Image (cartoon, rainbow, N blue to C red):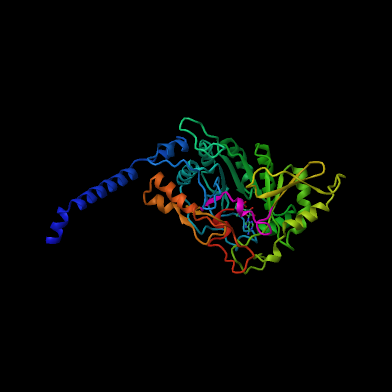
């Protein structure tokens, strides 16, 4: 009793107590009042109106600007590719309401994100995707090209909104997505031979569905469509030249991506678990294509195209007549981590700073506990400071990441 009485009379503690009450009240009010980010106001205005606006764009501890966001809107997939999935289609992680992904994006754009790629799982399985793209198309960037923050009255640029899909449902969705504001689409295709394609996806007649999707995307103005192909030695590496021909004939950019250790481990007879020997490297692909003579009499030999940005992941090539484009992304044989500008959000709202991170950062938990936009922005800044320098594929002691590709978002 005596102790309690003494506390009540200590002026320093009274001041401290009052300050705590004020902080708790402010916190409760902030949680009840709808976020300004839930309006369509530009994200740039948001941080500018904040009590402690940060003028700095998002950078990691190595000075890399983070401009590129990938969001997985579901980890369900309707394909069971032999190098990706163990055979199940269902989700392992939850999905957030679309409005929650949008709130995260708006905060991230206020910090410097300029490109948003929707992925999964299979993003076209997610209802509300077209509406999500329409909302993304209303957001404006918050920084000038020189990296300084725009003033509140200055309009930013529209986001670059991209989609990575297996294409199975694209035929009917390409036009509505384009109308909603999608900038471009990447379709994953690991063979141009229909039987090999179906053996990879483990879905009959999948090739025909995906080709219908590619045609619809081109007709909807989403070109040049990019085609992502993961080559597996002894399985689909006989497709390299056919893909070159396909790029020229179909007018698509074909990008070969080196196989990374991100698969769900599986003992299935047709499964392809990662081994260094299974990776078809950039050098091998270049050698093969340099020796290839396009069928219409054009001389053999790749012609390298200039790099468009330091953070560009692919080396790009065309042929002697300038028809067709081949990109090669070589995360295994020529890692590009030094220029990494990416941050990922998983379907359940976790931030991942690298495909190969050993842990996630639960941004959604911060939202659920009532974090204000400013608090979430500070949380994101702290997470980004922990972004890894690089991955360690192929090095002794390499550990697979805490999630597989399909549950991260490729
Ligand atoms: N379902 C969509 C699709 O098929 O494009 C989006 C998700 S999928 C995981 C994204 C991309 O990751 C696909 O192009 C796929 O080929 C690629 N991918 C999956 N596992 C991979 C691995 N272990 N190494 C390299 N790329 C991989």
The answer to which of 95 and 31 lies nearer the viewer is 31
Q: Is residue 27 above or below residue 287?
A: above
Q: Could you tell whether 123 is left or right of 277 in the image?
A: left
Q: Is residue 102 above or below residue 156?
A: below
- Residue 313 visible in the picture: yes
Q: Answer yes or no: is residue 1 visible.
A: no
Q: Nearer the viewer, residue 76 or 73?
A: 73
Q: Which residues are magenta?
A: 329-346
In this view, the residue farthest toward the left is: 2
Give the camera-side residue of 123 and 345.
Answer: 345
Residue 109 % position (x, y):
50, 42
Measured as percent of width and height from the top left, residue 294 is found at 83, 47
Quarter, ligand 1: bottom right
Q: Quadrant of residue 250?
A: top right
Q: Is residue 254 magenta?
A: no
Give coordinates of residue 409: x percent, y percent. 56, 53
């Amino acid at each position: 009793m005596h102790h309690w009485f003494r506390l009540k009379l200590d002026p320093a503690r009274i001041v401290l107590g009052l300050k705590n009450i004020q902080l708790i009240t402010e916190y409760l009010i902030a949680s009840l009042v709808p976020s300004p980010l839930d309006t369509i106001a530009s994200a740039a205005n948001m941080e500018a109106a904040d009590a402690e606006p940060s003028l700095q764009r998002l950078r990691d501890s190595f000075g890399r600007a983070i401009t590129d966001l990938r969001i997985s809107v579901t980890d369900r997939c309707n394909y069971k590719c032999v190098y990706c999935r163990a055979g199940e289609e269902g989700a392992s992680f939850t999905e957030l309401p679309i409005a929650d992904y949008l709130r995260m994006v708006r905060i991230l754009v206020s910090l410097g994100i300029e490109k948003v790629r929707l992925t999964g799982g299979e993003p076209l399985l997610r209802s509300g995707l077209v509406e999500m793209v329409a909302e993304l198309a209303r957001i404006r960037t918050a920084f000038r090209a020189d990296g300084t923050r725009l003033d509140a009255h200055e309009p930013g640029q529209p986001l670059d909104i991209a989609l990575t899909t297996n294409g199975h449902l694209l035929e009917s969705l390409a036009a509505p997505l384009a109308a909603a504001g999608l900038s471009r689409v990447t379709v994953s295709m690991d063979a141009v031979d229909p039987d090999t394609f179906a053996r990879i996806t483990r879905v009959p007649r999948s090739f025909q569905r995906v080709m219908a999707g590619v045609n619809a995307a081109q007709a909807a103005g989403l070109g040049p469509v990019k085609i992502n192909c993961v080559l597996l030695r002894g399985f689909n590496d006989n497709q390299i030249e056919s893909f070159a021909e396909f790029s020229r004939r179909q007018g698509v950019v074909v990008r070969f991506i080196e196989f990374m250790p991100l698969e769900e481990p599986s003992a299935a007879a047709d499964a392809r678990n990662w081994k260094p020997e299974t990776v078809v490297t950039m050098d091998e692909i270049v050698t093969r294509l340099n020796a290839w003579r396009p069928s219409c009499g054009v001389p053999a030999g790749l012609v390298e195209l200039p790099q468009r940005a330091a953070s560009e992941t692919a080396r790009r090539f065309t042929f002697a007549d300038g028809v067709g484009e081949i990109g090669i992304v070589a995360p295994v044989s020529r890692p590009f981590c030094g220029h990494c500008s990416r941050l990922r959000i998983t379907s359940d709202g976790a931030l991942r700073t690298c495909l190969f991170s050993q842990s996630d950062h639960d941004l959604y938990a911060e939202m659920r506990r009532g974090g204000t936009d400013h608090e979430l922005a500070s949380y994101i800044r702290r997470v980004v400071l922990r972004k890894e320098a690089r991955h360690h594929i192929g090095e002794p002691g390499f550990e697979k990441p805490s999630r597989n590709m399909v549950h991260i978002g490729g």
